Structure formats: structure tokens, C-alpha cells
Amino acid sequence: MESTILRTEDFNASFGTTHVLKNLNIKIQRKKITAIMGPSGCGKSTFIRCINRMHELNSNATTKGKIYLDGQNIYEQNPTILRRKIGMVFQNPNPFNTMSIYQNVLAGYTLNSYKLTRTKKDEIVEESLKNAALWDEVKNTLHKKGTFLSGGQQQRLCIARSLAMKPEIILLDEPTSALDPISTSKIEELLYGLKRIYTIIIVTHNIQQAGRISDYTAFFYLGELTEMDETKTIFTNPKNIQTQNYITGRFG
Amino acid sequence: MMKERLRFRETRNMIFKFFIIVCTLISIIPLVLLIVYIFRQGISVINWHFLTSLPKPVGEAGGGILNALIGSLLIILVATMIAVPFGVSMGMYFSESSPNWVYKIAHLCVDVLQGIPSIVIGIIIYIWLVKPFGQFSAFSGSVALSFMMLPSIIKSTEETLKLVPHSLKEASLSLGVPYYKTMLRVIMPAGISGILNGIILGVARVAGETAPLLFTAFGNPFMSFNIFKPIASLPLIIFNYAISPYEDWHRLAWGASFILVSMVLILNIITKVTETRWKVQF
Amino acid sequence: MFLTLLVSSLPSIKALGWKFIYGKTWDPVSGEFGALSFLIGTLLTSTLALLISSPFSLTIGLFLGEYYPKGWFSSLLKNAVELLAGIPSVVYGFWGIYFIVPVVRSLEMKVGVAPYGVGILTASLILSIMIIPYSASLIRLVVSMVPESLKEAAYSLGATRFEVIRFIIIPYIRSGLSAGILLALGRALGETMAVTMLIGNTQAIPKSIFDTSDTMASVIANQFTEATGNVYFSALIETGLLLFVVTTIINIIGRNIIKRFES
């Protein structure tokens, strides 16, 4: 039990009348990287947006079923506290353009109206940026606007921003799809290092990426979980024909 | 400690949302009152007689606004006839030209024109057209209004024509159709709904304008069809009657307000409908 | 085509410019046509109108742009706001005589000042009602242009909606907001008819917001056709020129801010 941090129970999600996720039962292991794959429109992004309850911000979005975080149903928790425990990094880097790099890292605290001492702030900023492998590149420009950074740096800044809140899980929604190969490999390295401390769930379009960095892979097809196993098994010996087709590039 | 903070933040969140809703509702109140009031006061006055007779002197019952109605329509008609050719051709010019300095200055001029207080336009036209001829005239009122219509016509023409795909123009040119014919026969018809929309919006904008007419069309208690003589108009008659102390005239003013507001609202609704129905699709 | 506009606007600039200098030399501020009282009147009514209307414009903007961008009530409200922007100002003024004047009059009786009913406060109230539709739709526009990704990022860090508005939306739209307020000010300054009908039209420096006064636009509207003598006449034109210059500058600045915001 100790190794499962998150599990869903007959979970459904829809937009209006479109049923996006169907009866999902999935278990996420603690301090591992779980990759979620599947053709576009299969509900990958919707799934991780349900985990930190961002899905319900859409006006016509509904959910049914349960998601347990450490044995507690997240839909019975306060979304604000929940989102602090589950960080999220989005497809396109989205640093707050009205704030400096320094303020961006601390945004989670300011937005939650926390008062921190100066030293504590410096400490958090330095630690988070180091964890996001960005410290050396920005330590002299901390008070410049975050939007002056390159795309890859911006994305690492966004990772630092979610790390600063010390979450239990980090959700990444195709974090590298808008980036160049070099930035991508940097972020992959970074994620590999982060799993010592955090549980990571990453949605990716890129089969190679899933193969390179993840411990477990879940394959979604048309809103259903087709197959989930250790990444090695999925890649070498998929049980499901659709998974096989996707991995060998026959569709999607 | 943590819990308490959270409760505080959530309460604040709720209060703020409540505040937004309440403020929005409060600000709707005068707007609704206004419409309801005009319609209630106006409808009781409107009848066939009101629309088809001339104003009577104070003390005599009855009287209508026929001359003002005709005057308004005449002024607006002439204003549209002046503004449309200029507006459409300038819009075409803008949509075709590259953003060099001429374009930028001309654009700035249009922006400036849009922001000029209407009373200032009245003064300018007075200096141009009333003073030299020594007489107020419907025509000078039309010119003043046509200036106020120009920006909306120019902008909607430009924006619509920019949406017309380049390939359409190239197709026509490659057939050996001369440039001006391409513009008139191919590009213009493709964007006609947007241009019409701009014209209607322009008319709606000036239909209720009073200030520029004070020193141009001036007003006239009698019937007149001569565009080179002073002429009555709805907004002017409302103004004059509204500030008069006579109850009878106030009733006429309510009737005129009702007609004017309905006209403007109908024009606006027409543009809304055409906007969604006729949207140029490529 | 562009030349037609330039050529035709040149004489006006020239005529006004010449008259402006002319009026200035013949018309010392302390003299018969001193403009100070209605300059103050204009400034006072416009600022007061902005102060009254801004909170409401902002809340409508947030209501339509952030809280309820869809739904029947919002589209009704949005259309109503747009249509109300089209109601002629003379009608607003007429309605003000019937509706706002009595309200202000009873207020004045309570406060214990001479109950004219008309005056700066009345004019400001009608002005604020008139500019709400205009600034609210501008603010709605800029609020709805705040990128979804920024808001999502803030929510994913556990912010409440209030905090998203306070720390993300407001800083993001700050320049757009100031442009909205500036353009509304331009409107308020040049507004003629409704103000003329409600301000009382007296050329004296107002001592309180209950006093009757005059604005630049209302002075022109009232006296232009009855101005006798060159000095009187050109002083009025000079007023118009001043109004023109001020509103033009305000509009150009406001539009530039909006343009920069959009790109």
C-alpha cells in the first residue's frame, strides 16, 4: 500500500455531453515517473487536469467517481489545498509576465497570501531554482522579468515555481512539446533527478520520451485505459493490439 | 492556523464575488430605469396625429413632430450620401496600402476624428459652411454628421476588406481585369456585408447627435425640404422642448425621445443580426 | 483620398489656430471671458464622473470578462450595455431632468444647501451613467484577453479566484485599465448635451459639488449662436480648440496604450 500514492476508482469525466474519460481505474506509484501516452483526444490531458481539479474550472465540465490521494478522496478536499500538494507544469511555458524570476518562483506563496521572511524567501528561491537546474543560469538576473528567458529556461522556471510549493506530485502536461531538442533533454534529465523526492506524472506525445524517462507507462485510447505496466514491459511486450500499433507508429 | 487562514481566504473570495455581482446589478438599475421610463412616457404620446402634424404654439393642445422627423431623415440621408463614398474609398485605400508613414498619419487622423467631441465638429463646420454663407442650413448639418460617420465606415471597410483573401484579387488580376475593376467588382462585393454594417453603425452613431446640429441645422418650427435652409431635427426638438418649462412640450419631447431611441436601437439590432448572419466566410 | 481629409482639415486647423492666438491676445483670463470657471467645472464634473463610474465599470468588466463570460444573462447584459452606449446624449439629459434632478434635490435638502437640483453633482451622475457602458466594454475586452495559461498556472499553485484576480489579472491589465479610464475621460470631457441640460449654466467658480457651474462644452452649446462681437465669438472658438486639443491628446495616448496591450 505504501507504494501507491494515487489511485482512481471508476473515474469518469466529461465536457457537456462529450464523455472524455470512461471508468478509469489506475494506480500511480510513489516516487516514480509515470508516463501517460495515447493518440490525441484520448483524454490524457483531461486526466491529469482532474488530478488537481483544474478540469472543473471549465464551466460545463463534470466528473463522476473517485480519486484517492494517500487514501483520501480528493473531491472531498479543498481544491486550493489540494492544488498546493499537486503541482502542475503546462504545455506552453507560462511564467507570470508581470513578475520577476524571483517573484515567479515565490508566486505560489504570494498568491496564497503567505508572509515569508527575507531569508526564507531567498532560501526557497535558491533551492527551487537549483532543483530545477536553472540557478546557475539566472542567479545574476533574479530580478529581471521571467519572460526574457528562452523557452526552455521559462519551462524550467515554471517547474521551479511548482517545486517551491514542495508538492507531493508534479503533473506535467506535454512539458517539452513546445521546446527544442536541447532544452527537452535538459528537462528530461531534470525530471530523472527529481523522482528521488517527487512523484511525477507526465503526459507525452513522444513515445521515445516515455521510453527514456518513465518507470511506468499508461496507454489511453478513446478515454479508456487500455494498458498500464512497467515501461519496459509495455515497450517490449505489449498485451494490447492498440498499444502495440501506437508504439510501433502505426497510428496517432 | 493553516485552516483559519484558508477559511479567511475563502470567505474573502466569496465576499468579492458577491460584491462583483451586487455592483453589476446596481449599475444595471439606472440603465433599465432609463429604457423603461422612455418607453412608458413615449408610448402614451405616440399616435398617428403625433407623427403627421406640425408642432403647435404653446397653449394649444396637440401638435406633432412631423417636421423634425422629416428633417432628421433628410439630414441623415444627405450625410450618408456624403460620407459613404469618402469612407469606403478611404477604407479601401487603407486595406490595400502597406503601413508606411502616409498610412500611419492617415490612420492617426481617423483615430483623432473619432475622438473629437461632437460640439467641436459643430464649430468647425460653422466656420466652414455657415459663416461664409451667412445662413444655417440642413446641408451644413449633414456635413457635420458625415464627419462623425466617417471613422466607423472607414474602419469597418478596412477590416472587412483585409479579410478578403489575396487569392481572390490575384485571380481577378491574372484574368487581365484592371486594378480598379478588380477592386470594384471583386473585392467590394466580397466585403459588402461588413461595409454595410459599418454604414449602419455610423448612421446609428449620428442619428442622436445634437451638439453639432446646434450651430448648423439650427432648427425650424415649420416644414422644410430645402437643404440649404435651417431645418428641424429630432434631437434638437428634444433638447429645445426638454429645457422649456411647458408640460405639453415635455410630452412631445418624450414622444420624440421614444422615436429616436427606437430608431437607434433598431439600427443597432440590425447590425448585430447582420454581423452574425452575413459574416463573410472564406 | 487621404489628401482630401488632410486638405479639408488643414483650413480648420489653420482657422482655429489663428483664432486661438487671436482669442488669447484679446481675451485675458481675468477679463470678461475668463475661462477658469468652466475649466474647473469641466475638470470637476469629469473627475467626479470617473470616480463614480470606475468601480462599476470594473465590476461589470470582471463580471463579463472573468466570472460569467457565457450564459444568457451575460449576453443579455453585454448587448444591453452596447445598446445603451448608443442612446443619444440628449435623451440621457432629458431623463436626468426627470429622474436625477429630484433625487439630487432631496439630497440637497437633507444636506442643507440650496436645493437647485441641477449642478455639478447632477451632471457628474448622468455622465457616469453615460460612460459606464463605454468603459465597461473596454475593460471586459482587456480582462478577457488575459491568457488562460497564466490563470491556470495560478490556480494550479492553489490560488483562489480572488487571488487570481488580485495578483494575476489586475497586474496584467493595468495598462489596459488606465487606457479605459483615459478614453472614458476623453468622452466625459467632450460630452455636451446631457451636461448642458443638467449643470445649471452659471459662469462662476464652483465652491462645492452642489453648486451650479458650466463646462467648456456647455458654454459653447449655450452661447455660440448668440455670441455677439468678435471677441466673444473667438473666445468661444478658443474654448472649442482647447477642448479639441485636450481630448485629442487623451485619445491618442489611450489608443496607443490599447494597441500596445493588444500586441
Image (tube, coloured by chain):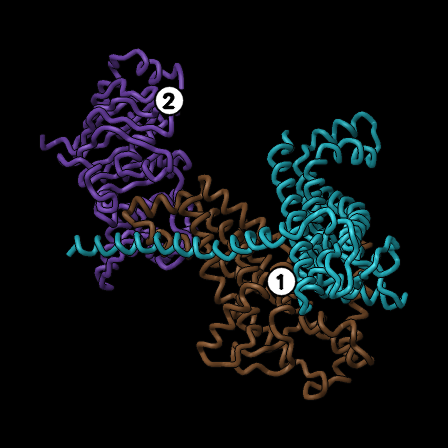
Chain colours: A purple, B cyan, C brown
Residue pushed farthest bottom? C30
What amino acid type is highlighted by mark number 2?
Answer: Pro
Give the tally of numbered discs: 2
Looking at the picture, how far across and down is residue A201, in whole percent? 26, 33
Instruction: Return the mark for residue C94.
Output: 1
Residue A25 position (above or below residue A70): above
Specify whether residue B250 is in view.
yes
Toward the viewer: A171 or C110?
Answer: C110
Residue B166 quadrant: top right
Circle 1 packing at 10 Å, graded few (<14), some (14-19), many (20+), is many
Give the residue at x 51% y 49%. C141
What amino acid type is highlighted by mark number 1?
Answer: Phe
Give the residue at x 68% y 52%. B260
CA–CA distance in space, label 2 to label 1: 64 Å
Residue B204 position (above or below residue A6): below
Residue B108 quadrant: bottom right
Looking at the picture, how far across and down is residue B90, in whole percent? 76, 47
Element at badge 2?
Answer: loop
Looking at the picture, how far across and down is residue B248, in whole percent? 68, 62
Circle 2 packing at 10 Å, graded few (<14), some (14-19), many (20+), is some
